[in-house]
Image: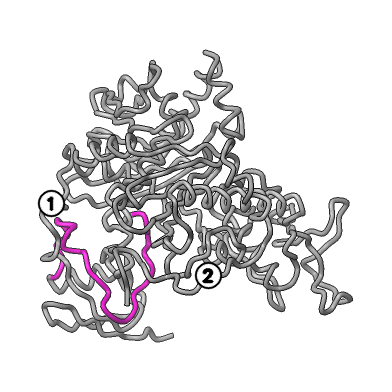
Amino acid sequence: MNQRQFTLHILPEGIDLQGYEGDSLHSLLLLAGLVDSRDARTEQFCLERGSISPADQPEAEAAVFSPAQRTEGWFLASQRHIAGDAVLRHGQEEQEEALLPAPLSGGYGLVFDLGSGTIAAGLVDLGSMNIPEISACPNAQLALAAQPEARLAMSRTAEGREKLRGLLLGDMQSLLSKLCSRTGVSPEQINAISCAGSSLMLDLLDPAPEPGSAAQLRQFTCGELGLSSLQPLTLAYLLPAAGPDLGADVICSCLAADLLHKMDQPWVTLLIDLGMSGEVIGAGLGRMVATSIPELPFEGQGIHCGMPAMTGAITQVEIGRRLVVKTVRDGRPRGISGAGLLSAARAMLEAGLLDAEGRISPPSRDPGEELPYLRSSINGRELILSPADKNFPQDIFINPDDILALQMAKGAIFAACQAVLHALDCGPEQISEILLAEAYRAHLQPRDMLALGLLPAVEPEQILSIGNAAWQGAFLCLSNRHYLEEAQQIAGSIRRLDLATDPVYAAQFIEGMEFGMQKSSSGRGRHFLGGERA
């Protein structure tokens, strides 16, 4: 099949370039002399009109551009491919000097997000601030204790702490080996490390954690941390936390979302970070309020056929005449991720297979119809997403317990949002934007969350997925010492909201469990990222 050819008009140079669908945009611009492979700033462009492909690694762009800039169309040429005719504006001349990177070291840096369910790591070229490779693995601690609370209890004994610490260091060194193998970078070239993660994860890294130390930036050498694959004197930064349940991952997410500078806006930004646990942070009207939600199913935990967003995990489901699933890297379905559970529930709701109270049943319009993807079991009806075959001997399905886990999570997230808004003395109509952060490539879709009613009633264009914001914030801390100081400032600015004693949360939880679209009120959607949009 012949490839289609498209025209790219480059501003302000006024140059027209011809390229074929699917070709690397960066290669085309490099041949034209419009980007310099030695300077990452030259590959910053803005899409004025037309279309380009989605980013190969959304984290790379999210670490360079703010959510407002990405909404405006800014992207990195190295992350995109030609997908149609387009007008692109070259952004090098528009960058402010204050935003240019001044990295903490030379050579390469290593950035970790030490999540309870998934550990993500990425290499960074500290000279250009390019991100050559990002990878992730399930947290090996899951085999010892699935829930963070159980791991916290284990960590209180010397034996349990050493087991958990050994597994964490093993995961970090395994990811380091994989990144170096893929990129050809040697461990000796890595001169700085930054680590985001829960308070427990970072305390396990700390050789001798002291009470209150998690609230401060901690600096060690890799030798002190026990990262034996790296040079003993390589610096490692454990980023600050705001409390036991608001760890450095939350601070880094706030940093990536630029919440410190949104506190004084006359409207509110909500940042919702979802994984094995969740956080809701509201910034605006002179305040920043945050709360945490334990035990969510968004990294596959608590789902009967659940798994993290790794190869083969189901992330999207559509139900029409047939049931169709999409998986990570288009692999053979091996399980269902949290995003897949959300997508399946939304598809079931739209197809009439799921009612507002969470009951699975055939569509009422044709109760006698035989549906091959529904079956009855001792626990109730189940939705078959992928039947067993010779390559994978188990059916992948959703049962009533999975739907109940999603309802509990939905109620908690919706009620937590309402509680945070109440603490800020505002309502949903004062929300400017909702930023969705997630674990490494979790693929959570705003469409599914709105359709199921997980979020406050806003317009779809007010919701932006920003990827693994915790990793992005840790990346920023390597790019400039200013961000280390800002992270510390955020940790001291957050007001913690305790949901266990919050009356608004208690009142909204049961109502929030019901499935269905949250209808936006008239006049909503006037405020967008960065201000008003006509």
509 relative to 440 in the view: left or right:
right
Residue under numbered circle 2: 520
Question: Residue 239's x, y, as percent?
Answer: 33, 33
- Amino acid type, callout 2: Ser
Residue under numbered circle 1: 98
Q: Earlier in the sequence, mark 1 or mark 2?
A: 1
Specify whether residue 476 is painted magenta. Answer: no
Label 2: how many Cα within 10 Å (few below 14, some 14–19, many 20+): some
- The residue positioned 43% from the left and 49% from the top of the image is 424
- The residue positioned 53% from the left and 67% from the top of the image is 447
Specify whether residue 35 is painted magenta. Answer: yes
SS at badge 1 = helix
Residue furthest to the top in view is 158
- Front one among 329 and 110: 110
Question: Residue 472's x, y, as percent?
Answer: 34, 48
- Front one among 450 and 144: 450
Nearer to us of marks 1 and 2 is 2
Instruction: For residue 177, say whether it is visible.
Output: no
Q: What are the residue bounds of the magenta stretch? A: 34-59
Quadrant of image for the N terminus = bottom left
- The residue positioned 71% from the left and 51% from the top of the image is 402
Question: Residue 127's x, y, as percent?
Answer: 16, 46
- Amino acid type, callout 1: Ala
